Image (cartoon, grey):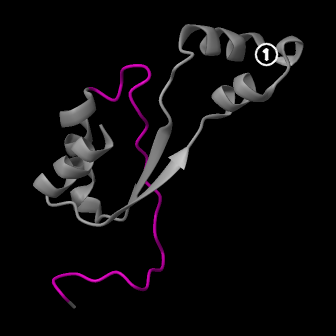
């Protein structure tokens, strides 16, 4: 699925993303706690989805006018992000950046 999202990014003119392996807090607690210490919600999630895939965090710096395009690229692959267990997209302002190049400059 990750390759499909990155291909979709390229198809939607989103270039240059960084991928990090990630794990959610509940999943981590459920996999590292003793049976008696696992919070109920963590135990239920581990029980219901024991073979859950690793997660990836995709970081892409895009201009404000490309955000909706990036969201569309993701939803074209995984479906509507407003549905449970699909993913999360958020933006943060970038006040300074050095080392990003556009159009070969």
Query: Which residue position is annotated with label 1?
Result: 39
Residue 5 is situated, as x and y percent measured from the top left of the image, at 26, 44
Residue 28 is situated, as x and y percent measured from the top left of the image, at 69, 32
Residue 89 is situated, as x and y percent measured from the top left of the image, at 40, 42
Question: For residue 81: magenta?
Answer: yes
Q: Which residues are magenta?
A: 80-104
User: In the drawing, does residue 101 fall left or right of residue 23?
Assistant: left
- Quadrant in which residue 105 is drawn: bottom left
Indicate the secondary structure of the residue bearing disc 1: loop
Q: Residue at x 22, y 42 (%)?
A: 4
Q: Residue at x 38, y 27 (%)?
A: 86
Quadrant holding the N terminus: top left
Residue 17 is situated, as x and y percent measured from the top left of the image, at 34, 61
Which is the main secondary structure of the residues drawn in magenta?
loop
Q: Residue at x 27, y 30 (%)?
A: 78
Total of numbered circles in the picture? Answer: 1
**In the foreground, 52 or 102:** 52
User: In the drawing, does residue 28 fall left or right of residue 33?
Assistant: left
Can residue 12 be spotted in the picture? no
Q: Residue furthest bottom?
A: 105
Can residue 82 be spotted in the picture? yes
Q: Residue at x 23, y 65 (%)?
A: 15
Q: Residue furthest front?
A: 51
């Amino acid at each position: 699925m990750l390759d499909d999202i990155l291909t979709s990014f390229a198809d939607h003119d989103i270039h240059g993303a960084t991928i990090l392996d990630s794990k959610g807090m509940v999943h981590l607690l459920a996999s590292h706690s003793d049976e008696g210490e696992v919070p109920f919600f963590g135990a239920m999630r581990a029980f219901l989805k024991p073979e859950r895939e690793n997660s990836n965090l995709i970081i892409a710096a895009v201009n404000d006018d490309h955000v909706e395009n990036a969201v569309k690229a993701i939803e074209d692959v995984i479906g509507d992000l407003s549905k449970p267990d699909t993913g999360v997209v958020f933006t943060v302002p970038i006040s300074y950046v050095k080392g990003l190049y556009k159009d070969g400059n």
